[in-house]
């Protein structure tokens, strides 16, 4: 089965762009991370809302809370596809960087995905 690339765009042939399985999983993780609960009409609890953390006062408690929030959301929404092994969150000023280490259940391969988002994006 072919999977659409995220964000949705047109490829060089003028068709909807597709992606491979590994990139598709990374895209799914990104969607969970940067979607705020309530943003999707038919799935009001989808996402984890880390973008709200960008402007919160920086502290070790906030980083730990964000790590638990991210890990819980990934397990809830993608637990049948991946096993989350580690989450690292680094927030500095208006930028958040998240590193997720996970095991792809289907292939048993370890992957690492990094995401960086600036506030106001």
Image: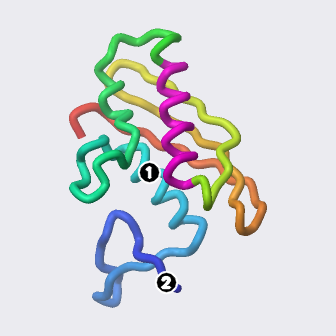
Report, in whole angstroms, how far the alpha carbon at label 1 lies from the one at label 2: 19 Å
Tell me the quadrant of the picture where the C terminus can be found.
top left
Q: Which mark is residue 2?
A: 2
Residue 71 placed where, x, y %? 56, 37
Residue 82: quarter of image = bottom right
The number of numbered discs placed on residues in the rendered structure image is 2
Where 96 sits versus 6, above or below?
above
Return the disc, 1 or 2, that comes first in the chain's sequence. Answer: 2
Tag 1 residue: 30
Q: Is residue 108 left or right of residue 38?
A: right
Secondary structure category for the residue under label 1: helix
Q: Residue at image x 54%, y 28%?
A: 67
Image spot of residue 58 (x, y percent): 41, 12
Q: Secondary structure at mark 2?
A: loop
Q: Kindly identify the residue that appears in the image at 46 percent across and 77 percent down.
A: 3
Up the image or down, 80 lies above or below 115; here it is: below
Tag 1: Cα neighbours inside 10 Å, few (<14), some, or many (≥20)?
Answer: some
Q: Residues within 10 Å of mark 2 (few under 14, many from 20)?
A: few
Specify the principal SS of the magenta part: helix
The stretch drawn in magenta includes residue 29: no
**In x, y percent, where is residue 91?**
44, 23
Task: State which region is magenta.
Answer: 63-78
């Amino acid at each position: 089965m072919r999977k659409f690339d995220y964000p949705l765009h047109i490829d060089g042939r003028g068709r909807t762009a597709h992606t491979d399985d590994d990139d598709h999983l990374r895209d799914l993780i990104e969607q969970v991370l940067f979607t705020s609960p309530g943003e999707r009409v038919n799935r009001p609890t989808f996402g984890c809302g880390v973008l709200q953390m960008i402007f919160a006062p920086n502290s070790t408690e906030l980083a730990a809370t964000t790590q638990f929030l991210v890990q819980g959301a990934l397990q809830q929404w993608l637990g049948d596809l991946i096993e989350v092994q580690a989450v690292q969150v680094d927030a500095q000023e208006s930028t958040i960087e998240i590193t997720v280490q996970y095991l792809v259940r289907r292939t048993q391969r370890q992957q690492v995905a990094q995401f960086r988002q600036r506030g106001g994006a």
